[in-house]
Image: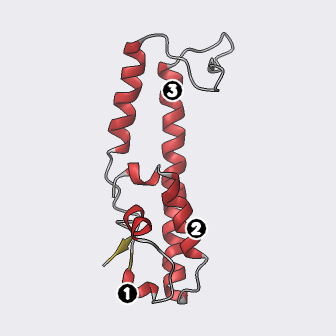
Amino acid sequence: MRLSRLTDPRFRDLLITLSKEKLPLRVGFKLKGIIKTVNEEHAKYDELRLEAIKRYAKLKLDGELELDENSGAIFESQENMNGFISELNDLVSLELTNIGSVSISELGDNLSLTTEDLLVLDGVITE
């Protein structure tokens, strides 16, 4: 599974929603482990993304980011913005192998997941 999947807010929200369903204990245990790993990987992503923003964006004299009226980082040049985008794209294309998965059959019959939900959770929910 690519890191980009973990950066989709729907992914983590759906995992948490799924963990609140009435599931067999074994599946609940697996989901708790998956959620913990997802949160750890997402935290590393956020930390590195912020480091990259600070490397490419405009900083104030105190070293803090200079932000626009929408609280977004300001890039001094298109070259800096392109550098940031390139590094971020490289990062989110990283393939993660430590997330874990649960099969649809393990989840049981009483779930309220849509096809779209299953697509968002693809890789964690398997056949």
> What's the residue type where badge 1 is placed?
Ser
Label disc, if present, on residue 105 of the rendered structure: 1
Q: Position of residue 61 (x, y in %)?
A: 66, 9
**Depicted 53 relative to depicted 96: above or below:** above
Q: Residue at horizontal 32%, vertical 37%?
A: 90
Looking at the rendering, which quadrant does residue 85 occupy? top left
State how far apart marks 1 and 2 are (Cα).
19 Å
Residue to which mark 2 is pinned: 16
Pick whichever of labels 3 and 1 is earlier in the sequence: 3
> What's the residue type where badge 2 is placed?
Ile
Q: Of discs 3 and 1, which sits in the foreground?
A: 1
Q: Tell me the quadrant of the picture where the N terminus can be found.
A: bottom left
Q: Nearer the viewer, residue 61 or 7?
A: 7
Q: Residue at horizontal 37%, vertical 43%?
A: 92
Q: Of discs 2 and 3, which sits in the foreground?
A: 2
Q: Residue at horizontal 49%, vertical 10%?
A: 76
Label disc, if present, on residue 52 of the rendered structure: none
Q: Secondary structure at mark 2?
A: helix
Pick whichever of labels 2 and 3 is earlier in the sequence: 2
Is 11 displayed left or right of 105 in the figure?
right
Q: Residues within 10 Å of mark 1 (few under 14, many from 20)?
A: few
Q: Secondary structure at mark 1?
A: helix
Image coloring type: secondary structure
**Depicted 64 relative to depicted 92: above or below:** above
Residue to which mark 3 is pinned: 53
Q: Tell me the quadrant of the picture where the C terminus can be found.
A: bottom left
